[in-house]
């Protein structure tokens, strides 16, 4: 378990400049697609939009955006862990300092603070997770939309 946390922290500390991060505005979401070398598309939903980046290896990063243009959630399904500092932005500190509320040995971890929720699970070659800010989720939605 210590090794997994060490690797996770190393991934977090190897920060690149942030583009569209959790809590940031919509204006920079397309920069993520370019930085990740992925194909960009938008799926409109009632009360929010999903900006989807399909990575060259088939992985997918989704950024959930309010009608006002704020990124309130991020999810991923990929062959490796995504660049968390890039995707979480200023909420990276919450991930590093948050209390682990649920952990399954070598499989899943949930970290939660008063204003941030992070869940990730997987194994070598397959990772899935999500992060969201409860206070930014539109009032007509539940956090379960971030999938």
Image (cartoon, grey):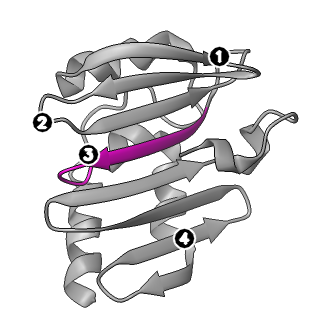
Relative placement, left or right, of 145 versus 118 is right
Task: First in sequence, mark 1 or 3: give its number.
Answer: 3
Residue most toward the right? 139
Magenta region: 72-83
- Secondary structure under tag 4 reads strand
Q: What residue does disc 2 label? A: 57
Asked if disc 1 and disc 3 are in contact, CB closer than 8 Å, the reply is: no
Above or below, 93 against 23 in this view is: below
Residue at 33 percent across and 78 percent down: it is 107
Please tell me how crowded label 3 is: few (under 14), some (14-19), or many (20+) other residues with Cα within 10 Å. Answer: few
Between disc 2 and disc 1, the foreground one is: 2
Please tell me whether residue 122 belongs to the stretch shown in magenta. Answer: no
- Is residue 133 visible in the rendered image? The answer is no
Q: What residue does disc 1 label? A: 69
Please tell me how crowded label 2 is: few (under 14), some (14-19), or many (20+) other residues with Cα within 10 Å. Answer: few
- Secondary structure under tag 3 reads loop
Q: What residue does disc 4 label? A: 111
Task: First in sequence, mark 4 or 3: give its number.
Answer: 3
CA–CA distance in space, label 3 to label 2: 22 Å
Q: What residue does disc 3 label? A: 15
In terms of depth relative to the viewer, which is nearer, 76 or 95?
76
Above or below, 67 against 115 in this view is: above
Residue at 14 percent across and 60 percent down: it is 125
In terms of depth relative to the viewer, which is nearer, 81 or 28?
81
CA–CA distance in space, label 2 to label 1: 28 Å
Relative placement, left or right, of 40 versus 120 is left
Task: First in sequence, mark 2 or 4: give its number.
Answer: 2
- Is residue 43 visible in the rendered image? The answer is yes
């Amino acid at each position: 378990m210590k090794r997994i946390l060490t690797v996770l922290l190393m991934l977090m500390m190897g920060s690149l400049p942030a583009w569209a991060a959790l809590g940031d505005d919509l204006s920079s979401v397309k920069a993520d697609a370019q930085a990740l070398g992925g194909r960009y598309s938008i799926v409109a939903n009632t009360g929010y939009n999903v900006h989807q980046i399909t990575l060259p290896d088939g992985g997918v990063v989704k950024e959930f955006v309010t009608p006002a243009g704020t990124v309130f959630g991020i999810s991923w399904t990929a062959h490796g862990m995504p660049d968390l500092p890039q995707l979480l932005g200023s909420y990276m500190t919450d991930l590093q300092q948050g209390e682990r509320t649920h952990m399954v040995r070598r499989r899943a971890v949930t970290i939660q603070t008063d204003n941030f929720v992070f869940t990730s699970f997987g194994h070598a070659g397959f990772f899935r997770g999500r992060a969201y800010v409860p206070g930014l989720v539109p009032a007509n939605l539940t956090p379960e939309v971030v999938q």
